[in-house]
Image: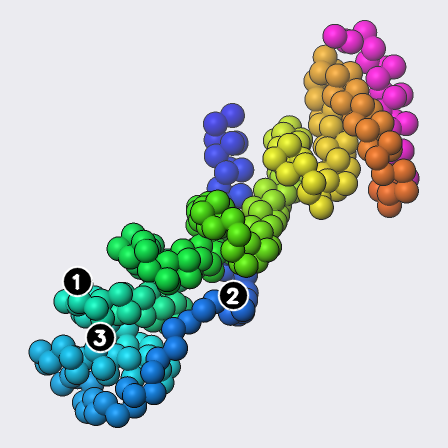
Amino acid sequence: MFRRELKYILILTAIVVLGACAAKKQPVAINPNIQDEVIADAVDTCDCGSYNRLFKGTNYNLKYSCALKYYKNKKYDKALGLFEELVPFLKGDTRGEMAAFLFAFSNFHVEDYESASFYFMIFSKSYPFSPRSENAAYMVAYCAYLSSPDIPLDPSNTYRAIQELQLFIDRYPTSARIPTCNTLIDKLRLKLETKDFRMAKQYYKMRQYKAAITSFKGVIAVYPDTEYREECLYLIIKSAYLYANDSFESKKYERYKMAVDNYYTFKARYATSKYLDELTKVFDDSKVQMEKYKPFKV
């Protein structure tokens, strides 16, 4: 039994890995609610010279001016390297807040979203009364959203993103960004919902009907308004019927009854479903089988 279960676990793992490899990463659409920093035109007068010489030098005033210039000119990789060095050096300086904020945004612009989320969080804690604090708090959540992986992969970052977005909503309940946050949360929940549904379908395809029934019921319980509800109920009935067919005689009655009971629920809710004709045949045969195995009625 253990070896058989291990076999199915390995197959499921392979399916998930192959799905992850096949998944095409979608381009990131920059959210319109992002408020990037506007850099003053005066930094254009800065003569930065060789980047390597500037980076290795000790003229921090020049480094700061050049970091602003690189950032304004969208050379974010160069700005990032300078701001990373400047942030601890300028702590307590009037320029420290700007350096920390743009360092976080530089990480964002080079698409290192996990680091960006972390540094926006550090900014929020370091400068809680800054006029940039709401923007930073939003970016913590939005970068976490962008870090959420494709559906087949580990959903830990997806759960974290939902948590961060909800924290922003709780902290800034009157923010103009609240509708955007709610939309992003809905997208993340759909991703989790789809992942759970696909896993349940894999159990069904692998003829692991008991696990499939449990998983489909779990999807409905966790996501009561799921768009997959009709298909989940359909596959619960099919799984119960097929599970009964493969069962010992002493178990057949109760498992056919499961198919019958769920059919009544399905028909009441989806009277015009495309699955109804097929399920009616399953229902009729299940009733016949229940009569046949009635002596085993519990």
Which residue is more in the foreground, 20 or 62? 62
Q: Position of residue 244 (x, y in %)?
A: 74, 24
Looking at the rendering, the stretch of residues picked out in magenta corresponds to: 277-298
Which secondary structure lies at badge 1? loop
Horizontal side of 67 relative to 12 (left or right) equals left
**Label 3 belongs to which residue?**
82
Q: Earlier in the sequence, mark 2 or mark 3?
A: 2
Kindly identify the residue that appears in the image at 76 percent across and 22 percent down. 258
Which secondary structure lies at badge 3? helix
Query: Spatial distance from mark 3 to mark 1, Cα to Cα?
Result: 18 Å
Tag 3: amino acid: Leu
Which residue is more in the foreground, 5 or 256? 256
Contact (Cβ within 8 Å) of mark 2 with mark 3? no
Q: Which of marks 2 and 1 is in front?
A: 1
Tag 1: amino acid: Gly
Q: Which of marks 3 and 1 is nearer the N terminus?
A: 3
Quarter holding the C terminus? top right
Residue 28 seen in the figure: no
Is 288 within the magenta? yes
Q: Where is residue 106 in the image (x, y as percent from the top left)?
A: 34, 71
Query: Spatial distance from mark 2 to mark 3, Cα to Cα?
Result: 27 Å
Tag 2: amino acid: Asn
Within-10-Å neighbours for mark 1: few <14, some 14–19, many 20+: few
Which secondary structure lies at badge 2? loop
**Label 1 belongs to which residue?**
92
Q: Which mark is residue 33?
A: 2
Horizontal side of 212 relative to 173 (left or right) equals right
Contact (Cβ within 8 Å) of mark 2 with mark 1? no
